[in-house]
Amino acid sequence: MIERRAFLAVAGTTLAGGVLAACGSGGQDDSNGIATATGAEQSTAASADVSILNQALAVEQRAVATYQTAAQHLSGARRRTAQHFEAQERMHVDALSQAVLALGATPTTARDRYALPPLSDDDAVLRFTMGVEQIAVAQYLDLIPKLSSQNLRATFASILTVEAEHLAVLREEAGQEPVPDAFVGRGT
Amino acid sequence: MAGITRRVALRNAGGVTLAASAAPLLVGVRTAFAAATGDEETMLGAVRLEQGLVIAYRTLAGSTALDAGAAALARHFGDQEQAHLDAVSKQLQTLGGVVPGEPAPDMVKAGRESLSALHTQEQLLAFAGALETNAIAAYYEAQQSLRRAEFLQTTAAIMANEGQHLALLREALHREPVPNAFETGQP
């Protein structure tokens, strides 16, 4: 309980409350019949959610590394945008890590190094960052229905929406149509 | 409760002051899923929500207060809202639900009232931003109540697209396009 209060004090957002509510005693979460499930079933559902959270965490850790690299290669307003997006990806990492911890599990750790393509100019950096965001969008769309916690589904959707917004801004910066498809993740 | 909802709706206007008469459609969008108790009712709410957005963008696109670029943006977003409407209508029908042939009269009336008080491009774009914010809030809540995987995926993909619309509207209003790390539809 002390840890929960401390995290809420640090995070200071209703979202953090939602994440922790999703990971708490289970009594507040009745999605997919979890509230009436047996203890063993609850444990299995929570274990599956931990696995899904760690998959999302790995995506976010890669996104942080991507924007760190992008900021090193860009300048001016584009660098500031990369730094802003990196800060937002770090907030996703923090929220997801706390959610894993709240479920009594260990968050996956970031790799020491990530494979990078040659980033010879701004266009290459933008293509790379857009690719990483497209993967993130596809991952979240795939993962959302697999979560047993209804609060975590909403949290994932809120992160998905931000990644889609990043993608729109990056496309615009690259001179592309920023919102080409009515449904994100459909091959764009 | 209605007063609170109305205040929330108006706070979402992106910093631009909107007339109180702009609230009805915003409230209608924000509370689209309020009474839903199952997937069918939630998807019916999504249909009504998207009908409201289609009406709003069609009206905006025809406004003489918008310059050519803003009008093109409104047309593009309106086309995408129509695609959302088609998709959620189809999914509602898979449950045996009946798609309303026309937007609800109260939604049409709310749209007319909402837009009648807005006269400048800034006000109209802020209104669109407020609509998108409220739609995101509604879809965020839907993620907590929907059960079927295909509905969760469709509504999440739509919610993210509304977020993209919102980012471009913020830019058009000279604001930071992605101010929050978590887009929940809260002001």
Image (spheres, rainbow, N blue to C red):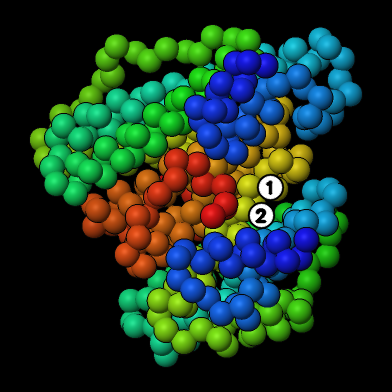
Q: Quadrant of the N terminus of chain B?
A: bottom right
Task: State the SS at label 2.
Answer: helix
Q: Percent position (x, y) of residue B91?
A: 72, 54
> In the rendered view, does B10 fall on the left or right side of B88?
left
Asked whether residue B179 appears in the rendered view, the answer is: yes
**At x 71% / y 84%, what residue is drawn?**
B109
Query: Do tag 2 and tag 1 residues touch (Cβ < 8 Å)?
Result: yes
Percent of width and height locating residue B133: 55, 59
Point 28% across, 29% down: residue: A66
Q: Nearer the viewer, residue A77 or A70?
A: A77
Chain of the residue under the numbered disc 1 shown in the image: B
Q: Secondary structure at mark 1?
A: helix
State the residue position of label 2: B138
* Chain ID at mark 2: B
Query: What residue appears at the point 40 percent right and 49 percent down from the top-left corner?
Result: B179
Residue at screen point 39% across, 36% down: A88
From what the image shows, is residue B113 above or below residue A132? Answer: below
Structural crowding at the residue carrying mark 1, measured as other residues with C-alpha within 10 Å and reported as few (<14), some (14–19) or many (≥20): many
* Residue B45 visible somewhere in the drawing: no
Q: CA distance from mark 2 to mark 1?
A: 5 Å
Q: Reply above or below: A60 against A160.
A: above
Instruction: Locate residue B145: give its quadrant.
Output: top right
> Which quarter of the picture shows residue A129?
top left
Q: Which residue is mark 1?
A: B141
Q: Quadrant of residue B70?
A: bottom left
Residue A13: give x, y in percent of width and height: 55, 37
**Badges 2 and 1, same chain:** yes
Name the one closer to the observer, A151 or B38. A151
The type of residue carrying mark 1 is Glu
Quarter occupied by the C terminus of chain B: bottom right
Amino acid type at mark 2: Ala
- Give the mark count: 2
